[in-house]
Image: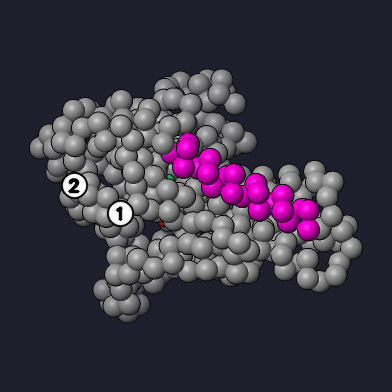
């Protein structure tokens, strides 16, 4: 049985990109139309759209938007291509850690470089390709969901961190795609969601989308996971990923590493759910993954209210890297990759 999720996070409509404004969740479920390349850059940077696969699609749409703008400038085809490729490289700098952004923008760059069409033809090809990537994202997530559902014990409780759901992708989700597929087979499974400070994607977004899809979810704060693991209340941990190195080391939202250590200590399986586009075979290990440093205000404030004394020092890395030895398996659209990751990832690519 297939689970039908109500959420479509991002889609190309006529000549603009329509997306859920995730900065408003859970107070409002509203959409925003992004109509220029620079607006898209800001939407990615300010996390109106967020989650590795979703920002990949946003980046691809951003190239469509830049192409439409450049087409109005009466450039020669050669200059159009040259300027558009520069804009594409600029788009890749909107956020540094999730490799899906670079992956999707590179797919658009291939279209630009290989096209034999005139300017309007190139735009048509770019739009067509971005819609293809959108549709494929949902299909891939459903495959990840189906493979992943096999590792969820009957009536089991899944702990997840951050939001790797429909709202982090075009729809359905990676870690929450596994939840959706498992729930379709067994509606006695349960989900625990970590709050995920500082931006609270677990509290704000994961619980929002699971409640919307009528899947039971319990919200816990980040420091509680070991307590519930010791009590035997967590059967499996499943999280998403922003970038996976060739040896399986995985960058995901800050706090994931702590959950993985706790899971290892309590002998609880810890899985990553991610599409192959999240695997960056150009880097050997997690040490090479660029970690985004975000604003101090994300830590000092909640909902615009200061929560600490003025004058404290702040460090705010957005992601951490979980070493491969803590990862039981990586659930992909081609099946579940197991250690030795260096070998199993190399075999897949
Ligand atoms: O900073 P965010 O909200 O973009 O970070 C999102 C995450 O870390 C997700 O867990 C990851 O991108 C996987 S999304 C399927």
Label 1 sits on residue: 209
Q: Is residue 266 visible?
A: no
> On the rendered image, what quadrant is the N terminus found in?
top left
| Mark 1 vs ligand 1: CB below 8 Å | no
**Residue 237, label in figure:** none
Residue 342 placement (x, y as % from top left) = 52, 24
| Mark 2 vs ligand 1: CB below 8 Å | no
Query: How busy is the neighbourhood of tag 2: few (under 14 within 10 Å), some, or many (20 plus)?
Result: some
Mark 1 vs 2, N-terminal side: 1
Residue shown at the point (62%, 53%) measured from the top left: 60
**Magenta stretch containing residue 139, yes or no?**
yes
Residue shown at the point (17%, 50%) measured from the top left: 218
Mark 1 → mark 2, Cα distance in angstroms = 11 Å
For the record, the magenta segment spans 120-141
Left/right of residue 112 with respect to residue 74 in the rendered view = left
> On the rendered image, what quadrant is the C terminus found in?
top right
Residue shown at the point (49%, 52%) measured from the top left: 54
Residue 283 placement (x, y as % from top left) = 59, 37
**Residue 216, label in figure:** 2
Secondary structure type for disc 2: loop
- Figure check: 30 above or below 101: below
Query: How busy is the neighbourhood of tag 1: few (under 14 within 10 Å), some, or many (20 plus)?
Result: many
Residue shown at the point (18%, 47%) measured from the top left: 216
Q: Main secondary structure of the magenta part?
A: helix
- Identify which residue, 182 or 322, lies in the foreground: 182
- Identify which residue, 215 or 260, lies in the foreground: 215
Q: Is residue 204 visible?
A: yes
Q: Is the residue under label 2 in contact with that under label 1 (CB below 8 Å)?
A: no
């Amino acid at each position: 049985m297939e689970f039908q999720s109500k959420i479509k996070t991002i889609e190309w409509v006529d000549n603009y990109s329509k997306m859920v404004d995730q900065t408003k969740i859970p107070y409002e479920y509203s959409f925003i139309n992004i109509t220029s390349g620079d607006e898209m850059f800001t939407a990615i940077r300010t996390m109106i759209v967020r989650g590795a696969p979703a920002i990949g699609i946003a980046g691809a749409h951003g190239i469509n938007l830049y192409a439409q703008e450049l087409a109005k400038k009466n450039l020669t085809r050669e200059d159009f291509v040259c300027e558009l490729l520069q804009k594409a490289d600029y788009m890749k700098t909107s956020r540094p850690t999730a490799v899906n952004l670079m992956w999707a923008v590179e797919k658009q760059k291939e279209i630009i470089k290989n096209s034999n069409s005139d300017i309007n033809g190139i735009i048509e090809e770019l739009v067509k390709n971005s819609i293809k990537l959108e549709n494929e994202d949902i299909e891939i997530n459903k495959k990840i969901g189906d493979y992943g559902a096999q590792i969820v014990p009957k009536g089991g409780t899944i702990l997840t961190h951050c939001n790797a759901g429909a709202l982090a992708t075009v729809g359905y989700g990676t870690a929450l795609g596994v939840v959706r597929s498992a729930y379709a087979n067994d509606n006695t499974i349960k989900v625990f969601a970590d709050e995920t400070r500082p931006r609270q994607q677990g509290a704000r977004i994961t619980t929002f989308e699971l409640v919307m899809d009528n899947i039971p979810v319990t919200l816990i704060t980040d420091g509680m996971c070991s307590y519930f693991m010791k009590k035997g209340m967590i059967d499996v941990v499943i999280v998403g990923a922003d970038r996976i190195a060739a040896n399986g080391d995985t960058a995901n939202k800050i706090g994931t590493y702590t959950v993985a250590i706790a899971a290892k200590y309590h002998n609880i399986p810890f899985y990553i759910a991610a599409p192959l586009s999240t695997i960056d075979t150009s880097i050997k290990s997690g040490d090479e993954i660029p970690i985004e440093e975000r604003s101090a205000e994300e830590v000092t404030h909640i909902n615009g209210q200061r929560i600490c004394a003025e004058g404290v020092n702040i460090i705010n890395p957005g992601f951490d890297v979980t070493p491969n030895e803590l990862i039981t398996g990586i659930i992909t659209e081609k099946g579940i990759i197991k250690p030795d990751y260096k070998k199993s990832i190399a075999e897949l690519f």
